[in-house]
Image (cartoon, grey):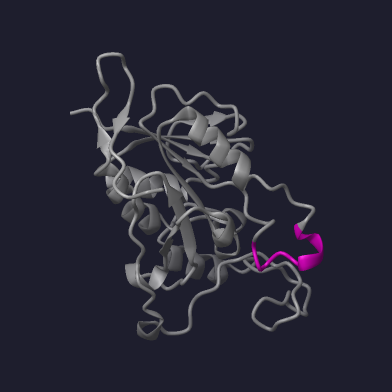
C-alpha cells in the first residue's frame, strides 16, 4: 500500500522528517541550505515557492530566531518573520498542513497544539507548538518526572545564568560529551551540534504525524489529495 507523501519545508537536518516517517509518511525535505546528513530525498530550494503538487501533507518549520527567547531582544527584529507568509502559502495550496515553532511564536499561531518532551520520555522539555488545519491534541507537561532538563540550544549571550555564553570563551557543544548528551536527550544520533540546536526531536512529529495520518485520505480520480478536518479552525 502506498504511503502518503509529506513534504518537510525548512527541513534542516531532518529531525521532524524522521518523526513523520515513523508515523507512516514518505517524506521529502526542502531547505535553502544543503544538509548532507538529511536522511530522505532532499531539494535545495525556497520553501515558500517549492511546488507542493503531489503531496498529501506539508510540514513547515519556518526559522524561529525572531520569536525565540534565546535570541537577544535587541536583535530579534533583525530576523525575518516567516510565520505569516508560510501560513499564507499553505492556505493557498489548500492541502493538509502543520506549522511548527517555538513557544515565543505561540501567540501568533492559530489554536496550536503544544508538545513537551517530558510527555514523550525525553530528557528535554523543549516546548514546541504545532498549528494545523486539522485538529491536533497537545501533550501534558510532566516536568516533575524529570531530573534537570538537558538544554540543547545555541550560545547567544544572555543575562541569565542558564543561557549565558561560557566565560572561558568556548562555545556550547564544543565538547564531545555535550554533543553526545544532546543527541541522547533529543533521540537524534546523526546531527552536528548546530543542527541539533535547531532540530525538533523525532518523537514530537511521530506524535503529531500519527494524528495527521487519521485525516489523510486517498487521492480522488482527478489526482487531488483529500482530507477531513475535524475541529481545526
- Image quarter where the N terminus lies is top left
Is residue 140 among what the camera can see? yes
Q: Is residue 72 magenta?
A: yes
At 51% from the left and 23% from the top, the residue drawn is 51
In the rendered view, tell whether residue 173 sits above or below residue 216. below
Q: Residue at x 61, y 44 (%)?
A: 84
Q: Is residue 180 left or right of residue 198?
A: left
Q: Nearer the viewer, residue 105 or 152?
A: 105
Q: Position of residue 11 (x, y in %)?
A: 52, 42
Counting every numbered tag in the picture gives 0
- Residue 151, position as x, y percentages in the image: 55, 73
Residue reaching furthest to the left: 1
Range of magenta residues: 68-76
Q: Nearer the viewer, residue 94 or 140?
A: 94
Q: Residue 142: horizontal and vertical position, in percent?
A: 36, 78
Where 53 sits versus 188, above or below?
Answer: above
Residue at the image point whose x is 75% and y is 59% from the top: 76
Q: Is residue 35 visible?
A: no
Q: Residue furthest top?
A: 222
Q: Nearer the viewer, residue 27 or 208?
A: 208
Whether 77 is among the magenta residues is no
> Picture coordinates of residue 21 (x, y %)?
33, 43
Q: Give the quadrant of residue 55.
A: top left
Q: Which residue is at a point 60% across and 32% down the rendered structure image?
A: 48
Apparent side of residue 84 relative to residue 156 in the rendered image (left or right): left
Amino acid at each position: 500500500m502506498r504511503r502518503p507523501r509529506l513534504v518537510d519545508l525548512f527541513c534542516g537536518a531532518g529531525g521532524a522528517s524522521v518523526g513523520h516517517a515513523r508515523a507512516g509518511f514518505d517524506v521529502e525535505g526542502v531547505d535553502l541550505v544543503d544538509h548532507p546528513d538529511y536522511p530522505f530525498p532532499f531539494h535545495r530550494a525556497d520553501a515558500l515557492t517549492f511546488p507542493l503538487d503531489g503531496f498529501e501533507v506539508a510540514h513547515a518549520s519556518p526559522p524561529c530566531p525572531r520569536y525565540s527567547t534565546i535570541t537577544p531582544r535587541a536583535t530579534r527584529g533583525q530576523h525575518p518573520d516567516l510565520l505569516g507568509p508560510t501560513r499564507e502559502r499553505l492556505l493557498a495550496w489548500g492541502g493538509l498542513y502543520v506549522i511548527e515553532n517555538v513557544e515565543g511564536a505561540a501567540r501568533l499561531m492559530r489554536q496550536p497544539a503544544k508538545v513537551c518532551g517530558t510527555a514523550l520520555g525525553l530528557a528535554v522539555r523543549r516546548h514546541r507548538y504545532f498549528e494545523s488545519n486539522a485538529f491536533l491534541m497537545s501533550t501534558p507537561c510532566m516536568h516533575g518526572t524529570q531530573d534537570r532538563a538537558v538544554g540543547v540550544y545555541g550560545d547567544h549571550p544572555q543575562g541569565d545564568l542558564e543561557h549565558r555564553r561560557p566565560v572561558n570563551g568556548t562555545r556550547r557543544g564544543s565538547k564531545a560529551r555535550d554533543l553526545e548528551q544532546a543527541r541522547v536527550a533529543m533521540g537524534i544520533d546523526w546531527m552536528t551540534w548546530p543542527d541539533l540546536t535547531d532540530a525538533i526531536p523525532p518523537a514530537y512529529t511521530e506524535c503529531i504525524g500519527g494524528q495527521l495520518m487519521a485525516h489523510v485520505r486517498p487521492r480522488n480520480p482527478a489526482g487531488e489529495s483529500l482530507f477531513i478536518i475535524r475541529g481545526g479552525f
